[in-house]
Image (spheres, rainbow, N blue to C red):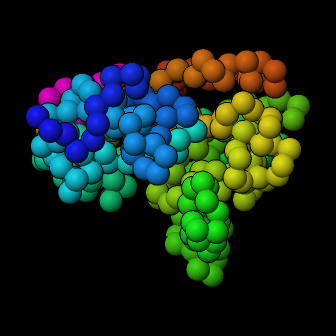
Amino acid sequence: MDYSVEPNDRVTFGLPFADDHLLVVEKPARVPTQPGKGHTHDTLLNGLFARFGRQLQSLGAKRDFGLLHRLDKDTSGLLVVALKPRAYDQLRDDFANRRIRKYYWAVCDGQPKRPSGVIKVPIADDPVSAEDRPGRPRLGRPSRVSGKPAVTAYRLLGQGESACLIEARPVTGRLHQIRIHLDAIGLPILGDQFYGPRRTKSASHRLALHAHRLSFTHPETGEKIDIRTDWPGDLRRLLRDLGLTRPARTFVPTSDREDEIDV
């Protein structure tokens, strides 16, 4: 069978959940989500086609070969991928209506003014064209004039002398939203090469951002799916060096909603 995306079984990924209708995939850092300029065969989608090519090809480009959302190349963590048209369409509707919850861990420079809050800063596309910055990705920027509404809830999980560990939940899905929003409140993410001051760019060997949890309703069974991952191994030394405690994969709340970040 001829595939639209070249299968590549050398691209590895975690698979914490899979059935006939959908996958929840854990993407490593430094792996693009889908093919693009300079990356035609080394992306997560190439790896997925090596194992699920028949199902993804059947979904076709119209349904993004099953991809329902993306992670930045340097961000690790969870993505949901559909394997059947009905699952894709229902999950797409769930994303559009903000019924799917995504949670991220981020190691940030500095300390927050408040231990939790909601960031409401509109985000616009960077006006600099791709032709003016060859080899650089599309960027965003805060703009209350031309930006689109963007909302991120956050809470503080731990503090060191010079850095902190934040859990963030993006309510909207703008380009680089968490990176831009945390920088906007004085908490740039360590290792971010495009946002924040120069000193934070070399403070981590990679972007210290991990999509650690996905919560949604299964589009076929109606079951509540809540997938959580461990702190990524390649960022454990960073936490130790900063005096931060590694967050737990599971959290046992004292009430039904204590483990949620509410907006």
Tell me if I can see residue 183 in this picture: yes
Which secondary structure dominates the residues rendered in magenta? Answer: strand
Quadrant where the N terminus sits is top left
Count of marks overlaid on the render: 0
Which residue is found at the position 26% from the left and 27% from the top?
50
* Quadrant of the rendered image containing residue 237: top right
Residue 240 position, x and y percent, is 77, 18
Residue 185 position, x and y percent, is 74, 56
Above-or-below relation of 230 to 77:
above
Q: Residue furthest bottom?
A: 145
Which residue is found at the position 68% from the left and 19% from the top?
236
Which residue is found at the position 18% from the left and 49% from the top?
60
Task: Inspect the magenta stretch and tell me whether residue 131 lies in it.
Answer: no
Which residue is found at the position 72% from the left and 39% from the top?
191
49, 82: nearer the viewer: 49
Residue 4 position, x and y percent, is 22, 45
Q: Residue furthest right?
A: 161
Lateral position of residue 210 relative to residue 222, left or right: right
Lateral position of residue 164 relative to residue 149, left or right: right
199, 218: nearer the viewer: 199
125, 160: nearer the viewer: 125
Tell me if I can see residue 177 in this picture: no
Residue 137 position, x and y percent, is 57, 55
Task: Inspect the magenta stretch and tell me whether residue 19 lies in it.
Answer: yes
Residue segment shown in magenta: 14-22
Lateral position of residue 148 relative to residue 126, left or right: left
Above-or-below relation of 158 to 94:
above
144, 49: nearer the viewer: 49
